[in-house]
């Protein structure tokens, strides 16, 4: 009985308590705004939904993302990020790598035995969950790996908006377990974006939340070179300032900040939010900045804080370099679920952005980046 309660109730309880929705943020929108929203290509650069024990093919009454809610919200592309390890007593300022919350979650959710002791296997397992989701949702959900996949999907959406797509990202390259050959294996599993660090320093370099917060290591340099060769995207979210600088110096590809706040409008998260210089370097690389929805990205201002950060990036570097990076299902509170992302469209209209600008912000910038820079095979 105790084991049954542990397996059946604990994961659901943990997710419900961690992935919450801020009250009072969803307001009524006009039919004109609804029509504009439905005409947009909408993309979100970061959701941790694969971590949790929900069937994403079915609509749920908790959590933030599943396929039905993506479709109802008209989100055409969701980047699904894979989390493989987080430290106990997690904080934004100083964490070590000698503890792990995900082991207990993996056991409670009955993940395969090999995932209980291997971060690499956890990454592969979550990738397999997304692959199975595509099979469970034929002609409804598409897993994007290549330019050709993406172009085929865009062609499908011209006549059918009741479909959505996903792309795999890794949040923390400690899942490589110090082996460069594991990078190629994760590429084969479908990963196309990798964030070098998450909440602690690792074999590649320093985390914004680590102890040393150092720059890139020799292994990190090898990973950078191989990712460039494989035409993968490096994500600088959670990286230390020193590591970010080294990545800009070494990579020849567009750099992504998949989910971040902006220091000039919200300084609460210290190194976690990007400086003006970092934003400018992302833009100079041809990359993109995904604006987060959680309180330390918005300084607790919810939708208004998201729009404030978007406007700042637009005024600093231009409309082409900003996107949405919600951090849905990422152990955070957000203003709404995927179902109500039209609230951002509504807020952008009220903030004075025109239709072309809104189209870029809500997803066209992401579509252009992936159409140009995803691998050919």
Image: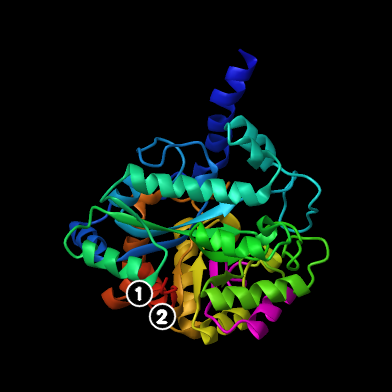
Determine which of the numbered discs, if any, sits on residue 360 in the image: 1
Circle 2 Cα neighbour tier, 10 Å, few/some/many (<14 / 14–19 / ≥20): some
Determine which of the numbered discs, if any, sits on residue 270 in the image: none
Residue 281: x %, y % from top left: 58, 84
Q: Nearer the viewer, residue 143 or 209?
A: 143
Q: Are dots 2 and 1 in contact, CB under 8 Å?
A: yes
Asked if residue 239 is positioned above or below residue 143 in the image, the reply reads below
Q: Is residue 62 left or right of residue 117?
A: left
At mark 2, the secondary structure is helix
Q: Nearer the viewer, residue 123 or 242?
A: 123
Q: Which residues are magenta?
A: 242-266
Q: CA distance from mark 2 to mark 1?
A: 7 Å
* Extreme-top residue of the structure: 1
Give the residue number, with chain letter if any, for mark 2. 319
Determine the image quadrant of residue 176.
Answer: bottom right
Residue 237: x %, y % from top left: 61, 66
Residue at (39, 36) in percent of width and height: 60
Nearer-N-terminus badge (2/1): 2
Judge whether residue 66 can be spotted in this image. Answer: no
Asked if residue 350 is positioned above or below residue 221 in the image, the reply reads above
Is 303 covered by the magenta stretch? no
Is 265 covered by the magenta stretch? yes
Name the quarter where the C terminus is drawn. bottom left
């Amino acid at each position: 009985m105790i084991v049954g309660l542990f397996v059946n109730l604990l994961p659901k309880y943990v997710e419900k308590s961690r992935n919450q929705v801020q009250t009072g943020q969803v307001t009524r929108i006009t039919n004109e705004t609804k029509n504009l929203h439905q005409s947009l290509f909408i993309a979100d650069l970061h959701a941790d939904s694969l971590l949790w024990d929900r069937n994403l093919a079915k609509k749920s009454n908790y959590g933030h993302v599943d396929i039905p809610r993506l479709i109802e919200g008209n989100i055409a592309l969701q980047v699904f990020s894979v989390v493989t390890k987080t430290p106990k007593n997690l904080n934004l300022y100083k964490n070590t790598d000698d503890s792990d919350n995900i082991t207990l979650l993996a056991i409670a959710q009955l993940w395969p035995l090999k995932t209980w002791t291997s971060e690499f296997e956890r990454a592969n397992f979550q990738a397999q969950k997304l692959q199975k989701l595509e099979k469970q949702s034929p002609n409804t959900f598409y897993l994007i790996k290549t330019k050709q996949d993406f172009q085929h999907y865009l062609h499908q959406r011209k006549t059918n908006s009741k479909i959505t797509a996903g792309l795999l990202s890794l949040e923390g390259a400690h899942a490589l377990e110090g082996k460069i050959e594991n990078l190629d294996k994760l590429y084969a599993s479908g990963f196309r974006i990798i964030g070098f660090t998450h909440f602690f320093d690792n074999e590649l370099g320093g985390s914004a939340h680590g102890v040393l917060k150092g720059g890139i290591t020799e292994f990190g340099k090898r990973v950078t070179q191989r990712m460039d060769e494989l035409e993968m995207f490096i994500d600088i979210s959670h990286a230390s300032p020193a590591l970010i600088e080294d990545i800009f110096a070494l990579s020849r590809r567009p750099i992504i900040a998949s989910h971040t706040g902006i220091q000039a409008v919200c300084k609460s998260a210290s190194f976690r939010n990007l400086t003006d210089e970092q934003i400018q370097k992302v833009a100079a690389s041809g990359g993109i900045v995904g604006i987060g929805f959680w309180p330390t990205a918005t300084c607790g201002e919810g939708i208004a804080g998201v729009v404030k950060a978007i406007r700042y990036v637009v005024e600093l570097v231009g409309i082409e370099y900003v996107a949405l990076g919600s951090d849905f299902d990422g152990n955070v509170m957000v203003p709404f679920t995927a179902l109500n992302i039209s609230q951002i469209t509504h807020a952008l209209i009220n903030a004075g952005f025109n239709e072309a600008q809104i189209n870029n912000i809500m997803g066209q910038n992401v579509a252009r980046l992936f159409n140009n820079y995803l691998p050919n095979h």
